[in-house]
Amino acid sequence: MVGDTVRVDTPPKLSAMLTKSVVSSVLPGQGKPRGTTLPGTVLERPEVVVDPGHLAAYNEVCGFRLSNELPATYPHILAFPLQVQLMTDPAFPFPLVGLVHLRNVITQRRPVRVDEAFALRVWVENLRPHDKGQQFDFISEVVVHGEDEPVWRDVSTYLRRSGKKSDGKKETQLAPPAPKAIWRIPADIGRRYAAVSGDRNPIHLYPATAKLLGFPKAIAHGMWTKAHSLAAFEGRLPDAFELDVRFKLPVLLPAKAAFTSWQVEDGFAFELWDARKPKPYLQGRITAR
């Protein structure tokens, strides 16, 4: 973590930042990189208190039971406005529109209770090459008041495509494993998740708005698919674990998806596939810590 820490007392307005980014993306020259380095600023909300009503709405949309502990994916939606604030800063080298969420790794040292106040801090680091462009990591941490070490950490890896032509190689398509559950994902899940997460990116809302940005239909939020996958393991998770998910292909809405999981030596592995054709949506692993 490098650079100055900037205190953020009020969560930034996601809707305004996303709207500005979408509008600016259609202006001439806005799709080009604006620099070659990432900003070193650390954004910190020192006083975060969870709204139980908001948490209940999140749990309902994602499939979690009501509890006095936060699902491991919940702090991500509290951190996301700070991520977007950095993405829309003039010092950030890439436009927000067009970034691809490749991977999300959440490490929970212990569950966070609903009644615990905590600080939330976010920064971006590790700009590096990718075979399709450049990638970088947004780091988010939760530090409960009175404790020195973060109890929760989130690493979100994003890709900025460079426009390079593909080398023509395609990944080998494997037959999907036998599903343990079939998810019928409704067409409005993007709007429902947007209502609780604040992420109203047009690609998740309606077919018409998604088509403006190059998608044939609206797509599900990757973090909704991750949260819904995590909900399948409720009652079987240790207090401390790492939840690592790689997002493979977008879920076009509505969708029929096949979920499967199996036990491994130190936890669980799981996958989500298109139920109609051998296309993987995500691959994940839960590892005890």
Image (cartoon, helix red, strand yellow):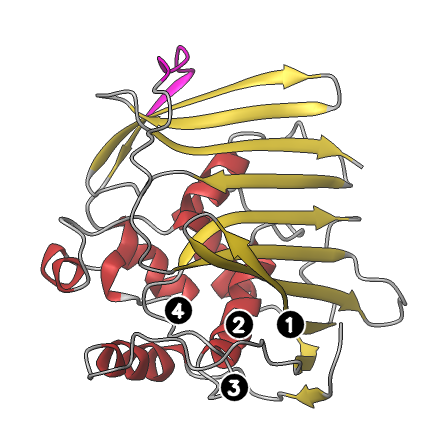
Quick one: 234 or 241, which is closer to the camera? 241
- At 22% from the left and 81% from the top, the residue drawn is 23
* Secondary structure at numbered mark 3: loop
Disc 3 versus disc 2: distance between alpha carbons?
13 Å
Q: For mark 4, does the 10 Å Cα neighbourhood hold few (<14), some (14 to 19), or many (20 or more) residues?
A: some
* Residue identifier under label 3: 91
Q: Amino acid at mark 1?
A: Val
> Which comes before the other along the chain, label 1 or label 3?
3
Q: Which residues are magenta?
A: 174-182
For disc 4, the marked residue is 198
Labels 1 & 2 near each other (Cβ < 8 A)? yes
Spatial CA distance of label 1 from label 3 is 15 Å
Q: Earlier in the sequence, mark 3 or mark 2?
A: 2
Name the quadrant containing residue 99: bottom left
In the image, residue 201 sits, relative to residue 41, either above or below, namely above
* Residue 66 in sight here: yes
The kind of residue tagged 4 is Gly
Identify the residue at the far left of this view. Answer: 208
Three-letter amino acid code at the position of disc 2:
Gln
Relative vertical location of residue 192 with respect to residue 285 in this rendering, above or below: below
Of labels 2 and 4, earlier in sequence is 2
Asked if the residue at tag 3 contacts the one at tag 1, i.e. Cβ–Cβ closer than 8 Å, the answer is: no
